[in-house]
Image (cartoon, rainbow, N blue to C red):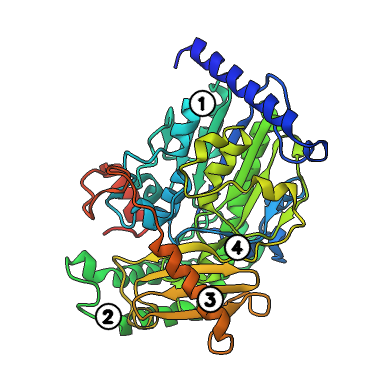
Amino acid sequence: MSEMQSAGALRLLSGLWLTAFALLPACERNAVAPSPGEEPVHIVIYLIDTLRRDRLGVYGYPRPTSPNIDALARDAVVFDNAYAPAPWTLPSIASLMTATYPVDHGVLFLGQQIGEGLSTLPERLGELGFATGGFVVNPTAEASGIRRGYDHFGVKAGPLFVGRWLRGVGAGPFFLYVHTAEPHAPFRPPAELVQRFGRVQPALHQRITRDTELLLDLLRADRDAGLAPGTRDNSDQQDTARQRLSRDRKAIDVLYDASVAWADANLGQIISLLKEMGFWERTLLIVTSDHGEEFFEHRGVGHSQSLYAELVRIPMIWRFPANQAGGIRVDAPVTLVDVMPTILDYLGRRDLTENDIGRSFLDLLKQPDAGAPEEPVVTSVRINRRNYYRPAKEQRGDFNVSVVEGRWKGIWNIEPDSFELFDTEADPGERRDVASEHREVANRLQQATVEWLHARPELDAGQGSTGDDRLDHLSPETLDRLRALGYVD
């Protein structure tokens, strides 16, 4: 884009912001409307891979894992019921970047990528005159096809690399996507942070890493051998690995908390950079995650194997320019699918979201005390194509959809055609299925979930995912990084 085109796009955006601001009632003008003026609004999404919501102080965790996130939250909008659309990175990030669910975009396993017919967030913002920079350390996210639309895309996300890009970004608006993975196994936090939370001897740390990698290998052993999952049932071996990891739970907690603190410290450096460079007051900063992590709450460790709270309830914090709407907490359910429509709505371009499956939640911020909607809201989808663990297969199969309505959370397990129901006020950890005690609620939520799935719109040709489960299109460097995280052999 030429300098003349960039200037024209910026003037167009400024005019739209002025119009949107003028149309708002006076009582709402200090909430979430962009301030009028010639200065651009910058958009930053800072996503911390595998970050559990309940390990942050802002969500009630007592250990000092997140001083920077907690300080940010005091001047921001905090969403108390935010959900990942999938329990692992690949489909979840594709959903974030396209405002569609996994059953819509079809990016379900390594080798598939976002179809050319689906426009991504950086592509849309680029068309509006934004400079676009992506810094993504998890190669699984990169493999989804999210490189599209970025002026610059790097595979290192430290403050040094981000700062170098920011210094050359120019005077116009920019979109920055930073995807870090400090809390992702295998855990490698700095030693001084480990000591803050406890003591883990090097030999124990190495054993945890080995057992974690062994469990991943066992989960996908059949698929890696070219067989249908479950052909050679190794569930007993998996149980042995799980038992060893369970005995090391205290050390795993220390390593995970130290890794969260590491991620928090790196975020703090990015915030400092934005302030030092004069961007902060005009920046919309979104801090979130793509999924959580299970630590034996439902017999497992890791992620991707269920839709329970530890995997799909995620942190979501929006700090608007000049601390607009700061201090608001929102109870209504939202998902990563809603992020792109909300950003575009904030920029005064709701017209660009008409065909999105996700919906803007900007109106929620104008009435934060309205409470959660009473109608069912589908939040997350799991479609397993690779892993096999017999107890999980027998209990919930490979296709699951979760739905929330007020205090109730339901999970429809499609293959066994069972429906789990949880009272999240009495049981936030979703440990006790009460479907048999509240049959009317369970039936209503299951029917709503069935209707939602049947009503999924058919995407136009070319919009769905491309590719198969071969990884030929990935570079040797990306494959090496996938191996380091345990995704491929």
From the viewer's perspective, is the residue at label 2 or at label 3 nearer? 3
User: In the image as oriented, which residue stretches furthest toward the top?
Assistant: 4
Front residue of this view, candidates 485 and 11: 11
Of the residues under marks 2 and 4, which one precedes in the sequence?
2
Amino acid bearing label 3: Arg
Of the residues under marks 2 and 3, which one precedes in the sequence?
2
Q: Residue at x 69, y 39 (%)?
A: 320
Amino acid bearing label 2: Asn
For residue 239, above or below residue 306: below
Q: Which quadrant holds residue 229? A: bottom left
As drawn, is 9 to the left or to the right of 103?
Answer: right
Real-space CA distance between mark 3 and mark 4, rounded to the nearest whole angstrom: 39 Å
- Badge 4, how many Cα within 10 Å: few under 14, some, many 20+? many
Of the residues under marks 4 and 1, which one precedes in the sequence?
1
Q: Which quadrant holds residue 473? A: top left
Real-space CA distance between mark 1 and mark 2, rounded to the nearest whole angstrom: 52 Å
Q: Which residue is mark 3?
A: 444
**The label number, if any, that marks residue 257 in the structure image:** 4
**The label number, if any, that marks residue 234 in the structure image:** 2
Real-space CA distance between mark 4 and mark 1, rounded to the nearest whole angstrom: 39 Å
Q: Which residue is mark 1?
A: 128
Amino acid bearing label 1: Leu
Q: Residue at x 61, y 31 (%)?
A: 42
- Provide residue 434's location: percent of width, then percent of height: 57, 85
Of the residues under marks 1 and 3, which one precedes in the sequence?
1
Of the residues under marks 1 and 2, which one precedes in the sequence?
1
- Provide residue 41's location: percent of width, then percent of height: 64, 29
